[in-house]
Amino acid sequence: MTVAVELLRALPKVELHCHIEGTMRPETVMDLARRNHVPLPANDVRDLYRYRSLDEFLSVFWLVQSVLVSRDDWARLAYESVVDAAAAGRVYAEVFVTPARHLAAGQSLRGVLAGLGEGLAAGDADTGCRTMLIVDMDRAYGPDAGRQLVEGLAQLRRAGAVGTERVLGIGMDSTEIGVDPLGYVPAYRAAAAAGLRRTGHQGENSPATAVAAVVEQLGAERVDHGLSLAHDAALVQRFADRRVPLTMCPTSNVVIANAFPTVAEHPLPRLRAAGVLVTINTDDPALTNLDLAREYAACAQAWGWDFDQMVDLAVDGVSASWLDEADKRALAERIRTEAVRLRPAPDPLAGS
Ligand code: ADE
Ligand code: ZN
C-alpha cells in the first residue's frame, strides 16, 4: 500500500514536535555562519548531517543554533520555517525553541522571542498558517537554568513582551543521559503557576520509568517521543486510559536516535492499537532531509496504512494540540472536509 505523497501534502496537517532551529535551511545556516563569523567544519553543512546517536546529533544541532545571533536572524529563521512547513501542508503548529545556548552567550529572551514573533507573524500572514511556540529548557544546561528560563518567560508574558503572545507553554529537550527528570520539578511547578502548558522530551534515550516521571511527577500534559514507553505494557495502558499524547517522530528515531533500522519497526502502530494518542511529526526536518508530507508518506508506506488512516492520524494531531475546544472542532472539521475532497476514487480493478 502506498499513499501518494502529493495527496498527503495537500491534506491539512498539524505538527506538535518540531524544533524551529532544526528547520533552518542549509543555505541559511551557511549564510548566517558567514555573516556572524561562526566557523563551520565543512564547506557544505549538509555533509555534517549524519548521526550515530542522539548526542552526536545534538552536537550538530548546537552548531546550527550558534549561527543565530541577532533579532533579525531569529525573524528570518521563523519566516522561512513557516513558509517551508506550509509547502508540506502544515496549517497549525506548536514549535519548540531552545534558547539556553543563546542566553548563555548574552542574548536576551526578550530579543529572541521578539525576532521569532515577527518572523512567525509574517510567515503566517503569507501562508494562512497558525504557528505557536513552546519554550524548551536545554537539559545540557541543568535544572537551575531551566527554572530561571521559565521564570524569565513568565515575567516577559506578564509584561506583554512582543512574541510572548505566541508562547503556549514550556518543555525540555536535549540530552537524556545521566539526567534525572525529577530535577526539573521546580521548573515545571513554576510553569504551572504561571499558567503555561507543559510538555517534555523523554524516552528517546531513557527508560519508560523516566517517561512516566515526566507526566506523573513533573505534571507534563504531553510527552515528546516517549519511545521507551512501548517497553512497559502497564504504563502503555495508563497513558492510553489517561489519553496522554505522545508526539512521535518516526524518521527522526531512525536517523537521529538510531533506535530502529527502519520506520517499519517503529512502535507507533502498536501504541496506537493499544489506545495511546500518538501524533506524527518531523522533529528536525532540515537536518534530516524531511518534511511533514514526506513523513506521513513514509509512515503510510512502512505500516501499510491507507489515506483514511492517515487522515485519522492528522485529526489526532488536533486532539493532542493545545488549541481551545472550539478551534479544535473547527480544525478537525477542516481536515475531514478536505479529506473528502482529496480521497482517491476506489480502484475499479481492486479485488478483481
Ligand atoms: N533537540 C532537537 N532535536 C532533539 C531531539 N530529537 N531530542 C532531543 N533534543 C532535541
Ligand atoms: Zn525533538
Image (cartoon, grey):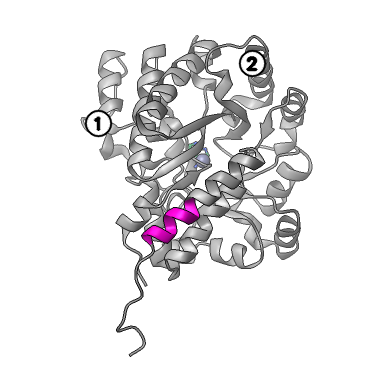
Can residue 43 be seen here?
yes
Which residue bears the numbered disc 2?
Answer: 157
Q: Name the image quarter holding residue 4.
A: bottom left
Was residue 164 drawn as part of the magenta stretch in this picture? no
**123 w.r.t. 252: above or below:** above
Q: Which mark is residue 309?
A: none
Type of amino acid at the residue the image marks with label 2: Arg
The quarter of the rendered structure image containing the C terminus is: bottom left
Q: Residue at x 57, y 53 (%)?
A: 316
Type of amino acid at the residue the image marks with label 1: Ala
Which residue bears the numbered disc 1?
Answer: 42
Q: Nearer the viewer, residue 324 or 218?
A: 324
Q: Nearer the viewer, residue 91 or 111?
A: 91
Was residue 336 drawn as part of the magenta stretch in this picture? yes
- The answer to which of marks 1 and 2 sits earlier in the sequence is 1
Q: Which residues are magenta?
A: 335-342
Query: Furthest residue to the bottom?
Result: 352
- Badge 2 marks a residue whose secondary structure is helix
Task: Check if mark 1's residue and mark 2's residue have beta carbons within 8 Å.
Answer: no
Q: Residue at x 28, y 26 (%)?
A: 28
The quarter of the rendered structure image containing the N terminus is: bottom left
**213 w.r.t. 67: above or below:** below
> Most prominent secondary structure in the magenta stretch?
helix
Apparent side of residue 12 relative to residue 272 in the rendered image (left or right): left
